[in-house]
């Protein structure tokens, strides 16, 4: 189950950011997950809870934001949702040789909410992906 390795990587990266930000606890992690990333959200949520045990993230809520897989045809510029399993044949012109995948492989931390020892819980937007795209 690769969801456990994903959960452990997310926890490790968020822990590192929380330490750097002098956080006392992390209460929420928002994760962007592409439709084609091969991640089962329920399995990831289960693994995330286990991976958080004994860390500054213990008890943190995991929120996943799904990203629909979309493609564009280089021949006719048509765009479409590719679905699951992915249909990479252009519905407008029928070509499958010049297809560009626009979205659907994302796997990144979007936001982390943590509590500072002094101030309370700020939301920390992640402008750069903490996790590498799959």
Image (cartoon, grey):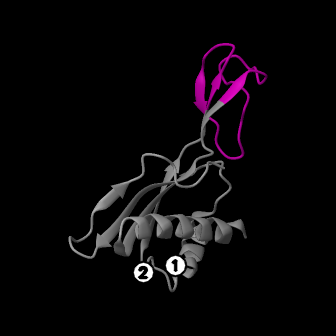
Q: Main secondary structure of the magenta part?
A: loop
Per the rendered image, the range of residues in magenta is 71-100
Q: Residue at x 71, y 41 (%)?
A: 86
Q: Classify residue 83 as left or right of residue 45.
A: right
Seen as rendered, the residue at the extreme bottom is: 54
Q: Is residue 6 magenta?
A: no
For the residues labelled 2 and 1, say whether their Cβ atoms are less than 8 Å apart: yes
Expressed as whole percent of the image width and height from the top left, the position of residue 62 reads: 46, 68
In this figure, which residue is indicated by the disc labeled 2? Answer: 59
**Badge number at residue 32:** none
Instruction: Report which quarter residue 77 is drawn in.
Output: top right
Q: Residue at x 52, y 84 (%)?
A: 53
Within-10-Å neighbours for mark 2: few <14, some 14–19, many 20+: some
Q: Classify residue 64 as left or right of residue 27.
A: right
Q: Is residue 106 above or below residue 7?
A: above
Within-10-Å neighbours for mark 1: few <14, some 14–19, many 20+: many
**Quadrant housing the N terminus:** bottom right
Q: Earlier in the sequence, mark 2 or mark 1?
A: 1
In this figure, which residue is indicated by the disc labeled 1? Answer: 52
Instruction: Report which quarter residue 19 is drawn in.
Output: bottom left
Instruction: Report which quarter residue 41 is drawn in.
Output: bottom right
Q: Is residue 68 above or below residue 91?
A: below
């Amino acid at each position: 189950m690769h969801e456990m390795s994903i959960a452990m990587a997310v926890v490790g990266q968020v822990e590192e950011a929380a330490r750097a930000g002098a956080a006392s606890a992390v209460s929420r992690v928002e994760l962007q997950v592409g439709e084609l990333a091969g991640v089962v959200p329920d399995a990831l949520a289960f693994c995330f809870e286990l991976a958080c045990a004994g860390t500054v993230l213990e008890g943190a809520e995991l929120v996943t934001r799904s990203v629909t897989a979309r493609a564009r045809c280089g021949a006719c510029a048509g765009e479409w949702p590719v679905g699951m399993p992915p249909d990479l044949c252009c519905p407008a012109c029928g070509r499958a040789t010049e297809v560009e995948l626009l979205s659907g492989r994302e796997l990144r931390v979007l936001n982390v909410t943590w509590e500072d020892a002094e101030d309370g819980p700020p939301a920390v937007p992640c402008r750069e992906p903490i996790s590498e795209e799959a």
